Image: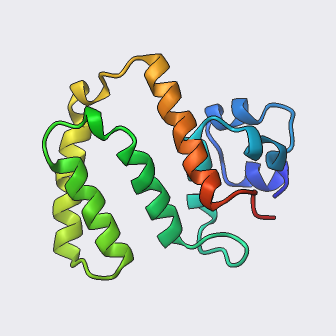
Amino acid sequence: MTNKELLELKPSVNAMDWLGSRAVAECWSGCERGDLMLWLLARKCNAGAPWPDHRLVVELACRCAETVAHLWRGDAPANAIRAARACIARTATIKDLRDAAAAGAAYAADDSAYAAGESARKRALARCAEIVRDLVPELPK
């Protein structure tokens, strides 16, 4: 992927700061922002080989979310992850997904869900980057 191709995906300011003056492929191996890596994969999923399909991107997002399970209160996040994985396996109904999404949105709207400090947030994002690289070691071309 070229920097021009990345710009066509309309990345956020954070993504552009992450890129800086480096090539996108160069950033992948040293990236400590799993959220940005997931964003890029999600934007390109189902674009055909060598990009991953949506099922892999959803699984990566689930694995990343599970790294902060110790911060969860209640069952909404775990239920949303179960529903996402059921969707990947094609065993979920539309109602299952809507219910999980509604519960997850209500949870995310609760400010106390963001109780972790900045250093904990950076560690979680770096761990997510490792998770992404475990299954997508190099940026697809």
Residue reaching furthest to the left: 74
Q: Viewed as shown, does residue 17 lie left or right of 60?
A: right
Q: Viewed as shown, does residue 44 lie left or right of 108?
A: right
Q: Position of residue 28 (x, y in %)?
A: 74, 46
For this rendering, which residue is in front, 31 or 7?
31
Residue at x-position 80% and y-position 31%: 20
Q: Is residue 80 above or below residue 115?
A: below
Residue at x-position 64% and y-position 32%: 13
Q: Is residue 46 above or below residue 6?
A: below
Residue at x-position 64% and y-position 64%: 44
Of the 4 image quadrants, the one containing the N terminus is bottom right
Residue 17 position by quadrant: top right
Q: Position of residue 48 (x, y in %)?
A: 68, 78
- Please, which colouring scheme is shown? rainbow
Q: Position of residue 113 (x, y in %)?
A: 26, 30
Residue reaching furthest to the bottom: 90
For this rendering, which residue is in front, 134 or 56?
134
| Count of numbered marks | 0
